[in-house]
Image (tube, rainbow, N blue to C red):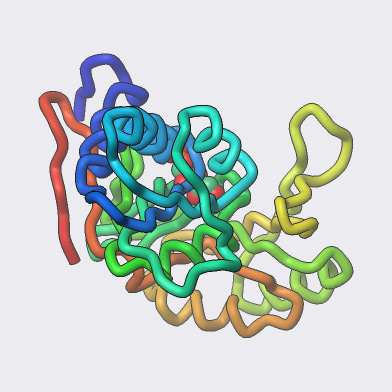
């Protein structure tokens, strides 16, 4: 689907559309990535106009952006539930299963998105796919690298340690862990794979989000399409 202004314009439409769902008094999950950033900026403008919200950041990056644009923050350790979370995705399937973690923030994103009454995914059309087929990011304790790699291979996956840009060596997450990007080809049963990955000792969190998204807002040529679970 063509998107005038390119992917970033589509991301902005989606992010701003989702931010408009936030109402006075809400506790809002602030996702990570370029699409969620548009929602955070829109929330900052709404706060300037008098909206009363508390944001829960999913990463250093979303925390810093929220501070920059004036969205008040509350710590993840201080909340049990959220009214709404707005977050991006690397892939969204027809049945709203997601692959997340392109920004290595999926551990905190999963906690925040799962704790929200309403989890809204924001995306551009390139993220939509009938079935998930991208590599699944898996955050793991550094000492468990060899054992987790072996377990992923036993699931017919091919793990690749994520390398850092601008630094020699691997990506280290906000939680001090490593990330394996695990290729499984087309994922015909995301729920089963999600369970298998979650039960590997040493895995902190993986990027398959199954049964969590309530709706997805996709920026298009002339607006935003919404799909609901
Ligand atoms: O999961 C994520 C970060 O861990 C992001 O939401 C995902 O990578 C999408 O990013 P973008 O909106 O920049 O395409």
Q: Is residue 11 visible?
A: no
Image coords of residue 85 (percent x, y): 36, 56
Vertical arrangement, residue 69 with respect to residue 177, above or below: above
Say which of 68 and 182 sits in front: 68
Say which of 224 and 158 sits in front: 224
Image check: 124 left or right of 111?
Answer: left
Q: Quadrant of the rendered structure where residue 63 is?
A: top right
Could you tell me which residue is drawn at 31 percent across and 56 percent down? 26
Image coords of residue 191 (percent x, y): 41, 78
Image coords of residue 195 (percent x, y): 51, 82
Say which of 205 and 97 sits in front: 205
Q: Is residue 172 visible?
A: yes
Could you tell me which residue is drawn at 59 percent across and 79 percent down? 198
Could you tell me which residue is drawn at 27 percent across and 29 percent down? 49
Q: Quadrant of the rendered structure where residue 42 is?
A: top left
Could you tell me which residue is drawn at 83 percent across and 72 percent down? 144
Vertical arrangement, residue 199 with respect to residue 18, above or below: below
| Residue placed furthest toward the top | 5
Q: Where does the C terminus fall, quadrant-wise?
A: bottom left
Q: Where does the N terminus fall, quadrant-wise?
A: top left
Q: How many marks?
A: 0
């Amino acid at each position: 689907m063509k998107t005038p202004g390119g992917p970033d314009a589509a991301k902005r439409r989606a992010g701003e559309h989702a931010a408009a769902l936030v109402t006075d008094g809400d506790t809002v999950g602030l996702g990570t990535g370029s699409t969620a950033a548009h929602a955070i900026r829109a929330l900052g403008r709404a706060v300037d106009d008098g909206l009363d919200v508390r944001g829960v950041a999913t990463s250093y990056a979303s925390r810093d952006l929220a501070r920059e644009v004036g969205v008040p923050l509350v710590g993840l350790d201080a909340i049990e539930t959220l009214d709404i979370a707005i977050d991006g995705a690397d892939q969204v399937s027809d049945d709203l299963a997601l692959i997340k973690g392109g920004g290595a923030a999926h551990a905190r994103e999963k906690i925040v998105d799962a704790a929200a009454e309403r989890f809204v995914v924001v995306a551009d059309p390139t993220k939509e796919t009938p079935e998930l087929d991208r590599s699944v990011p898996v955050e793991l304790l550094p000492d468990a690298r060899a054992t987790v790699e072996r377990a992923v291979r036993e699931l017919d996956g091919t793990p690749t340690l994520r390398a850092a840009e601008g630094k020699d060596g691997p990506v280290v997450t906000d939680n001090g862990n490593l990330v394996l990007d695990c290729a499984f080809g087309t994922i015909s049963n995301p729920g089963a794979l999600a369970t298998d990955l979650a039960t590997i000792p040493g895995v902190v969190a993986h990027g398959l989000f199954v049964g969590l998204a309530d709706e997805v807002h996709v920026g298009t040529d002339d607006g935003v399409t919404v799909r609901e679970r």
